[in-house]
Image (tube, coloured by chain):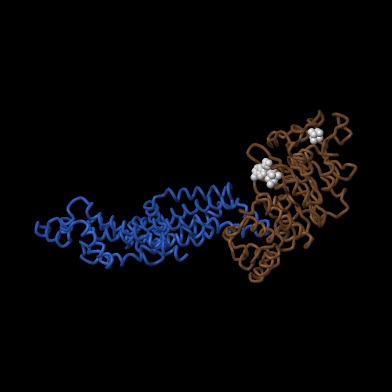
Chain colours: A brown, B blue
Amino acid sequence: MTKATDTLIEEPILEIRNLQTSFFTDKFEVKAVDGVNFAVPKGKTLGIVGESGSGKSITSLSILRLIQNPGKVKGGEVIFKGENLLDKTEAQMRQIRGNEISMIFQEPMTSLNPVYTVGQQISESFQIHQKMSKKEAMLRSVEMLKLVGIPSPERRVKQYPHELSGGMRQRVMIAMALACDPELLIADEPTTALDVTIQAQILELMKDLQNRLGMSIIMITHDLGVVAETCDYVAVMYMGKVVEYAAVKDLFKHPKHPYTVGLLNSLPRHDIDLEDEELQVIKGSVPSPADMPKGCRFAPRCPFASEICRERLPDLEESEDGNQIRCWIYTDEWDGEPEVNVNGERTS
Amino acid sequence: MLTFIVRRLLQTIPVIIGVTILTFSLMHLIPGDPAQIMAGESASPEQIELMRERLGLNDPLPIQYFDYLKGIIQGDLGNSIRSGREVSGEIALRLGNTVELAFYSTVLSVFIGLIAGVISAVRRYTFIDTFVMIIALFGLSMPAFWLGLMLIRYVAINSDLFAASGWGTWSQMVLPIITLGTAGAAIIARMTRSSMLEVIDQDYIRTARAKGVKEQVVVYRHALKNALIPVVTVVGLQFGSLLGGAVITESVFAINGIGRLIVDSIRSRDFPIVQGGILVLSVLFVVVNIIVDIAYRYLNKRIDLN
Ligand SMILES: Nc1ncnc2c1ncn2[C@@H]1O[C@H](COP(=O)(O)OP(=O)(O)O)[C@@H](O)[C@H]1O
Ligand code: SF4
Ligand SMILES: [Mg+2]
């Protein structure tokens, strides 16, 4: 199996190798994250895309070791600045959380504590990681609110979450996450719960802050549109595995994995007339973890699936352009149609 | 907040009026002729008629009620049949003991209940959780009189540290407080546990952890404050029902409080005292509930103030 770093000129700030996280229910084990590999280059944005349930959130929570019972990170490595986070003690992890690696979540409505003011919640980061006094921390919180573009921050800082709109709350979350100037920001569907105009504003803000502060970002989304706008690299996940890892420009121009192609085809396109083009969706739905396919996880839904696909799981292999792909079509062992045009009508 | 308090106070007026109507009716609901009862078994018809006149029992009911209300407002709850002393004085004499008993019992239930509930929730589905919850179930199912008697039988009698009766010194107070506080502790423990379990899975708890907050701080600062909101109401109701529960505990431990006064007065058919005692306990209950409501409102800033 190749390492994600091989393809990248930039040095990665974070590299994940064969990460495995499972949930142990009464009867069986749900492999939510099943051998995930990817790298996040310094100062760049890696997108993680995939349908709901593909393991994106669990992957990101595993990085910060925030998986709660009955879940457990079973194996693999999470190399952050050269050190494996899975070997750290809980106290060491606390030093990293919110300080070197921060996270923002999908649900701005419920991700802030309702009984503390916005200021108290941002201040907490300063107090924990920079040992600031309450007063000092509150002043810095006002500055953070200013940084994320919240008007009249002196007033807002004293308000409770319920007094703020969803977009405002997500800005507060971003302010909180960036308080201690983290090197890596993990954003788990930061705009999914927001309406379209607010979405664009929040993405704009994140890009702007990245340019100013220089942090790396993992942008988790199920929206390839968001990836196109914000990411440099992208890892496509399906059923707990990365199926394709590529530079964003390559992925959109030459998607290789049939699943990626399916995702792209289900995107509304602006370059062709929508009226005579039916929006295509991937047929079928994600199988339940209980009946995990034995071979390629995507085989039951893949239009190209052949004998070998149903029998054996393909590895994540590097292709000639330096990107990575997990599909039998791109191997010597491929036993299906010799000339498969996976990319179909999308390549012109 | 101020308008809320004022409105809440105004809302209690009909409740208090309702209570007075009930206690007033008590006089007329008891079997037999109140004048006969008050004048005593051996009274002559003339004496009874005199008593009837004195009590205003010949007036129409609404007039009687308004006289009763007027008396209450002036602090006049009538006179004890047995001793002839003013009911208000008899009650004032004992109110302190009862309130003290209810208050300390509440403090004990809150203290034990919160600790047990939090421990249970943090260790959910472990042996400790199961153990604490079984104890709580016992605490909840034990009748106060039985627990009181057991404490007297097995603790007070075997130890010089605790007295079996009376009120005032700590050695007298500990066992009644335990007796009265146990059920409350159990209720609060169960309530806190379920409330904590609900809160601990919330997104904002994950946010706190992602910030690098210590697990203890997550539990006590981020989770408990939210989990407490529903518990506060229970605590208030608890205190109210403890005033009632005090009746039993005071009888078992021979504490000179309102509860025991009421029981004794029922036995001796001293109805003005029963009436006054119930009225005072009810008003106290209402007042405590207002305080709880205000505290709840204060804690629960999420609710809009209108
Ligand atoms: N608490 C849990 N208990 C059991 N299984 C879980 C739990 N949380 C997540 N999973 C499993 O992990 C899979 C991946 O979840 P998740 O990472 O949240 O998906 P995504 O973020 O890509 O939508 C889910 O399909 C589910 O089967
Ligand atoms: S390995 Fe086979 S089933 Fe899986 S994506 Fe490739 S072609 Fe489809
Ligand atoms: Mg998710």
Ligand 2 - quadrant of the structure image: top right
Q: Give the side of residue A154 with respect to residue A250, left or right.
A: left
* x and y percentages locating residue A202 in the rendered image: 70, 56
Q: Give the side of residue B177 with respect to residue A4, left or right.
A: left
* x and y percentages locating residue A315 in the rendered image: 83, 39
The mark tally for this picture is: 0
- Is residue B159 visible to us here? no
Which residue is at 42% across, 60% downward? Answer: B105
Who is closer to the viewer here, B259 or A102? A102
The quadrant the C terminus of chain A occupies is top right
The quadrant the N terminus of chain A occupies is top right
Who is closer to the viewer here, B157 or A2? A2
- Is residue A117 visible to us here? yes
Who is closer to the viewer here, B199 or B93? B199
Q: Give the side of residue A247 with respect to residue B273, left or right.
A: right
Which residue is at 28% across, 61% downward? Answer: B276
* x and y percentages locating residue A292 in the rendered image: 72, 35
* x and y percentages locating residue B51 in the rendered image: 14, 60
Which residue is at 80% across, 37% downward? Answer: A258
Most distant residue in the right direction: A320
